[in-house]
Amino acid sequence: LSQEAACKLDMILEHAERLGKTTREISGFARQHPTNEPELLDLNSLIRNTCRLMRFDGRWKNIDLQLRLDNGLPAIRGIGDQLTQVIMNLLVNAADAIEEAGASRSVIAILTYPQEQGVCIEVRDSGCGMDASTLEHAQETFFTTKAAGKGTGLGLSLCRSIVEAHGGDIEIESTPGEGTRVKVCLPLNSPGGQT
């Protein structure tokens, strides 16, 4: 194998292991049992690694992914696999919204920044956006606007559950035809990160 192929293979194996853990996390969502303990995390690294994985999805070749990560972002205590799941779900939703919109300008921006006693992650997309009714129900378990077989309605509900278990909150703002902004704020010291 060439060095580039070996590097890609290592990355695939690393992300396959992470996906296995993510699958166990989703199973744990129904059982309400934690699978691992909180640790000190660099959210910027989690975001970069998740974005590398998402690049294997063919839709991403036409998306302008903009990372605006605060280099001085403090580390937080949390469960890395769970927070990776949140980031991944938000990115998948953003890509789906862009695909649905068929927009000529396909942009997903991820921002991180400190806030008082915590940090924030924002995912902004130039997708189809949501009307007020959809936005009102977006975080409900099993609510989806996606076609049968495409969405489970667990993504944002799972995100909310994980974020709240970490002592944080999640806000969604959206305008039809203009896109969506999801803001996740997390404390520096998670109360446990258990869902």
Image (cartoon, rainbow, N blue to C red):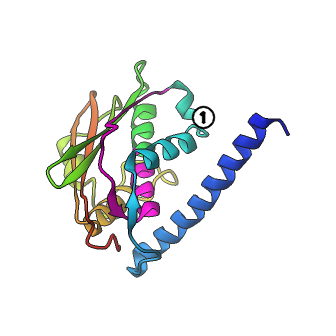
| Image: 40 above or below 12 | below
Q: Residue at x 57, y 37 (%)?
A: 55
- Point out the image quarter for the N terminus: top right
Position in image of residue 41 (x %, y %): 39, 57
| Image: 73 above or below 169 | above
| Image: 157 above or below 46 | below
Q: Amino acid at mark 1?
A: Gly
Position in image of residue 16 (x %, y %): 64, 57
- Residue beneath disc 1: 58
Asked whether 74 or 179 is in front, the reply is: 74
| Image: 113 above or below 188 | above
Magenta includes 88? yes
- Point out the image quarter for the C terminus: bottom left
Asked whether 177 or 72 is in front, the reply is: 72
Position in image of residue 109 (x %, y %): 36, 32
Q: Using residue 175 as the reference point, say whether residue 58 is left or right of it.
A: right
**Which SS class for mark 1?**
helix
Position in image of residue 100 (x %, y %): 42, 34
Q: Which span of residues is magenta-colored?
A: 63-90
Q: Residue at x 40, y 19 (%)?
A: 105
Magenta includes 143? no
Q: Residue at x 65, y 47 (%)?
A: 11
Mark 1 crowdedness (10 Å alpha carbons): few <14, some 14-19, many ≥20: few
Task: Determine the residue located farthest toward the top in the rendered image.
Answer: 104
Task: Determine the residue located farthest toward the right in the rendered image.
Answer: 1
